[in-house]
Image (cartoon, grey):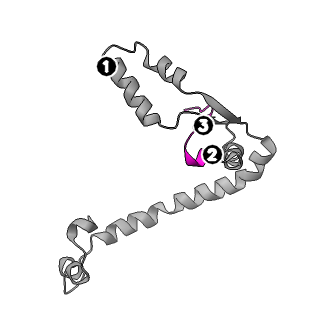
Amino acid sequence: VQFREVRVLGGGAKSAVWNQIKADTLGLPYVRVTQEEPAVLGCAVIAGAAVGLIRDPVASSERAVKVSDRFEPRSDFHEFYREFAETYESFVNSLEETYQKLEKLRSLEIPGKGVNKLRESVGVSNEAVG
């Protein structure tokens, strides 16, 4: 999959500085859109298409969503952030084995008391633990 741009909205999209940093880091344009409630718009478009009121859902969505700002990546900053991004990605990937071990530990029974009795003694229901 080749991405051409990132579309952003909501609270995090309000910061021009943060959008520029993200554009620089990813090397992709960040495009802030005016549509604040995409789920509501999507539901309305799908419902309209389902009952025959909307013939082209894609065109209808594109007409409803307008671009308010565009943040182009800057190549010198992209190079600057590259090592940070690679280090972060390496860190996240290194956690996979740790999370697998933690998942196994989650199912262990506590010696002598059993997990249910221990949970009851501290006031945690089995449903809360999941």
Q: Which residues are magenta?
A: 1-13
Q: Residue 106 is drawn in which quadrant? A: bottom left
Tell me the SS state at disc 3: strand
Q: Is residue 111 above or below residue 108?
A: below
Label 1 vs label 3, nearer the camera: 1
Q: Is residue 5 magenta?
A: yes
- Which one is earlier in the sequence, the residue at label 2 or at label 1? 2
Spatial CA distance of label 2 from label 3 is 14 Å
Instruction: Give how far across and how far down residue 4 sits, in percent.
Output: 63, 31
Q: Is residue 106 left or right of residue 69?
A: left
Residue 72, label in figure: none
Tell me the SS state at disc 2: helix
Report the quarter where the N terminus lies.
Answer: top right
Q: Is residue 26 left or right of residue 10?
A: right
Task: Give the residue type at disc 3.
Answer: Val
Residue 50, label in figure: 1
Label 2 vs label 3, nearer the camera: 2
Name the outermost residue toward the bottom. Answer: 112
Label 2 vs label 1, nearer the camera: 2
Name the outermost residue toward the right. Answer: 76
Q: Residue 99 is drawn in which quadrant? A: bottom left
Task: Give the residue type at disc 2.
Answer: Lys
Q: Of residues 7 and 82, which is closer to you in this image?
A: 7
Q: Residue at x 47, y 35 (%)?
A: 38
Instruction: Give how far across and how far down residue 61 sits, in percent.
Output: 49, 23
Instruction: Give how far across and how far down residue 25 sits, in percent.
Output: 69, 47
Q: Residue at x 69, y 40 (%)?
A: 27
Q: Residue at x 58, y 61 (%)?
A: 91
State the residue position of label 3.
6
State the residue position of label 2.
14
